[in-house]
Image (cartoon, rainbow, N blue to C red):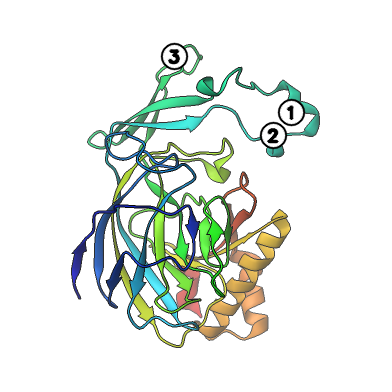
Amino acid sequence: MALHQFAPTHYFTTIGSHTPVLRIADGDTVVTTTVDARGGDASNEQITERGNPMTGPFYVEGAEPGDTLVVKLEKLRPNRLHGWTGKMVAPNIVDPSYVRSLPWPTEEGKSLAIWEVDNDAGTVTLIEPADTKLGRFTLPLAPMVGCFGVAPARGEAISTATSAQHGGNMDYRGFVEGVTVYFPVLVEGALFHIGDGHAVQGDGEIVGTGVEISFDVQFTVHVQKGKQIYWPRGENADYIFTVGNARPLDQCVQHATTEMIRWLQSDYGLDAVGAHLLLGQTVEYDLGNVFDPAFTMVCKVPKRVLPKI
């Protein structure tokens, strides 16, 4: 088990079978940085193209198709003082008759809000625009990673604007420090990518952004040999969860729920009827991204019910 300090020199706006930037082994830890969704680094300088640029990919020795890559998110920390968000909710999440009433920006330069991010105080504060009735509206800092995953199969490269079985731009506010995430390994080495840090974000990323900011990150990887999963999974102190990415929204629910049924039967020993009965009365759903080409739904089961089975 080794600790790698990695300084990125280039980034990708697709997740795919790109040349690895670093080869790491099962149990290794990586400390690195990410840029924001528009390519801004820790000094707020745009150093690469827009579109959720990814740090990586990281080649994990021994990972092969049919395995599971385990990623423990150990540090997700904003590394500058200011982030930005969109100012208007997406037209697709309001009634069609209301779309013309949205506060459309008169010019691109007026489309963003600026937020002050204070790691020491643990706060995110609105500073621009200053003329809304919110004033200097303050929220608790809640860093999360919006886009990350492994390379898709068959040499495919998928835009970081969207998501699928490999992960990608899921924008789920539950991807925070301390969470363990599981990805299906679809190519040799898994080729793990990470980026798109948010200082805070509401469910759905309905304005098209969280508070977008560059990050210092640390993660540790493990390989579960011969364990095949089909969609991303995760767990925190209180829940196990599965992630479905697709459009329309009901297809996301189908993917996430099916993956949870598989998990309850393969790892927790439930029969089919038992898994369905448990889900029927304990399941919880969280909304991930509903802004981008693919939507995200998260299917959760409280860990408090699992010891009983």
> Mark 2 = which residue?
91
Give the amino acid type for the residue marked by disc 3 in the picture. Answer: Ala
> Mark 1 = which residue?
99
Element under disc 1 = helix
Element under disc 2 = helix
Per the model, the C-alpha gap separating discs 3 and 2 is 24 Å
Asked if the residue under mark 1 is in contact with the one under mark 3, i.e. CB atoms within 8 Å, the reply is no
Query: Where residue 198 sits: x, y (%)?
Result: 41, 43
Mark 3: few/some/many CA within 10 Å (<14, 14-19, 20+): few
Query: Where residue 152 sits: x, y (%)?
Result: 53, 69
> Mark 3 = which residue?
130
Asked if the residue under mark 1 is in contact with the one under mark 2, i.e. CB atoms within 8 Å, the reply is yes
Q: Mark 2 or mark 1: which comes first in sequence?
A: 2
Residue 39: assigned label: none
Query: Where residue 89 sits: x, y (%)?
Result: 61, 32
* Residue at figure coordinates x 46%, y 47% from the top left: 52
Q: Is residue 247 above or below residue 303?
A: above
Give the amino acid type for the residue marked by disc 1 in the picture. Answer: Val
Quadrant of the rendered image containing residue 218: bottom left
Q: Is residue 60 above or below residue 270?
A: above
Q: Nearer the viewer, residue 44 or 290?
A: 44
* Residue at figure coordinates x 44%, y 83% from the top left: 64
As drawn, which residue projects farthest toward the top?
131
Per the model, the C-alpha gap separating discs 3 and 1 is 25 Å
